[in-house]
Image: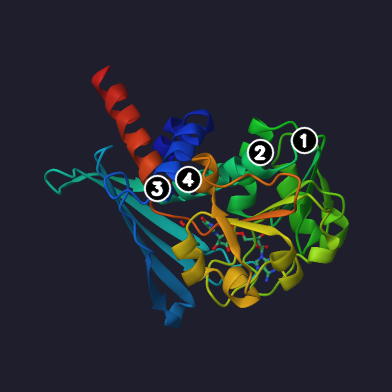
Amino acid sequence: CKADVEELLLYRDLVPLLEEALGKFSTRDTEEVIQSVRTAVPLSKHSGFMLLMPTYMEKDAVLCTKFVCMYKREEGSTLPAVNATVVLLDPERGNVKAVMDGEVITAMRTAAVSAISSKLLMDPGAEVLTILGTGTQALSHYNVFTEMFSFKEVRVWSRSIERAESFVRSLKGPVTVSSSVEEVVRGADVIVTVTRCTEPILMGRWVKPGAHVAAVGACRPDRRELDDTLMKEAVVYVDSREGAMAESGDVILSGAEIFAELGDVINRVKPALRNKTTVFKSLGMGIEDAVPAKLIFDKWKAKSSSL
Ligand SMILES: NC(=O)C1=CN([C@@H]2O[C@H](COP(=O)(O)OP(=O)(O)OC[C@H]3O[C@@H](n4cnc5c(N)ncnc54)[C@H](O)[C@@H]3O)[C@@H](O)[C@H]2O)C=CC1
Ligand SMILES: O=C(O)C1=NCCCC1
């Protein structure tokens, strides 16, 4: 259940394992990782999609799939925008070993991958972090970024100043809020976009040269968070080239060139161009769920057998 996942999943364990897995994925060695572009089933009546994300890591003996439903929710709706379940199987027998709540896994692994992109691509002297959005991903990104890095200033934007203020009240440290994207973005060294918007909200002309953008929302081919100027002027990194070419409106509709996968940087096949403006376009991939699922299962088993 959600409480077990929350207790067992820690960023300090998750981040290095995800970094290793991203590197394995980018080798395209099928004995390391088999993970195709996910299947998206439209739920038109409900303005949503179900995404199916099967993954096999032969050498690590991990067979896993996530079912995740994403919806276009009206502002103020109490229904979840993202609802996920992770299923871990025994690769030898094909039986289900565990069914896990996917909400915390999705929130934490997505934020952990954005943090890895920032570790690799941001200016090492980065001082100002800006988060656009105040939902589930905004919180997990705030948590891991403040755990891993020492920003001098954190800024948060939401379309509604009341929502931004209420989000900030749930956080530990000092945060500046605004309902102007331009205001929070100007001068920021790292910008995280975690919104459900469908049209660009982050304009390249506001972004400081050399900044790093981790772009997490807009995960369908017709959705955008970033404008063409930013996409074309920045060096673009992705989690998966195939995934980005199939699902990212920011990549497809801008015609921007993908420079590298994060795994290529981890494998030292492509450089981390820290002195340039960089965009990491995150779509999410099955290995990012398979890795925490195994970690949680192994910890849960060790804990149960010690009782
Ligand atoms: N790349 C990845 O691996 C993943 C991406 N996502 C995506 O990240 C985004 C955020 O997800 P959650 O935090 O779970 O959602 P959420 O619903 O908890 O938060 C969404 C935020 O976007 C804001 N928002 C909604 N419509 C907007 C609009 N038109 N313009 C500007 N802001 C708007 C909301 O006020 C809220 O602050 C979604 O687009 C989701 O699909 C989610 C999980 C994984
Ligand atoms: O990878 C995921 O998990 C998701 N990606 C796109 C939006 C929904 C969740």
Q: CA distance from mark 2 to mark 3?
A: 27 Å
Q: Is residue 260 shown above or below 126?
A: below
What element does badge 1 sit on?
loop
The spot of residue 79 in percent (x, y) is: 52, 64
Spot occupied by residue 42 in the image (x, y as percentages of width and height):
41, 77
Q: What residue would you read off at disc 1?
A: 151
Horizontal arrangement in the rendering, residue 181 relative to residue 245 (left or right): right
The disc placed on residue 145 is: 2
Of 154 and 246, which appears nearest the observer? 246
Residue at image mark 4: 104
Extreme-left residue of the structure? 93
**Would you name the residue on which mark 3 appears?**
27
Nearer-the-camera pick, 57 or 69: 57
Crowding near pointer 2: few (<14 within 10 Å), some, many (20+)?
many
Q: Residue at x 59, y 67 (%)?
A: 218
Of marks 3 and 4, which one's residue comes earlier in the chain?
Answer: 3
Kindly tell me whether residue 239 is visible in this rendering: yes
Above or below 271: residue 239: below
Mark nearer the viewer, 2 or 3 = 3
In this rendering, the answer to whether 244 lies above or below 299 is below
Tell me the element at label 3. helix
**Mark number, residue 302:** none
Q: Residues within 10 Å of mark 4 (few under 14, many from 20)?
A: many
Q: In the image, what residue type sits under mark 3?
A: Thr
* Badge 1 amino acid: Phe
Q: Which of 58 and 276 lies nearest the eye of the viewer?
A: 276
For the residues marked 3 and 4, what is the alpha-carbon distance in whole angstroms?
28 Å
Tell me the distance, in whole angstroms, between the alpha carbons under discs 2 and 4.
Answer: 16 Å
Are the residues flagged by discs 2 and 1 in contact, CB closer than 8 Å? Answer: yes
First of labels 2, 3 by sequence position: 3
The answer to which of marks 2 and 4 sits earlier in the sequence is 4
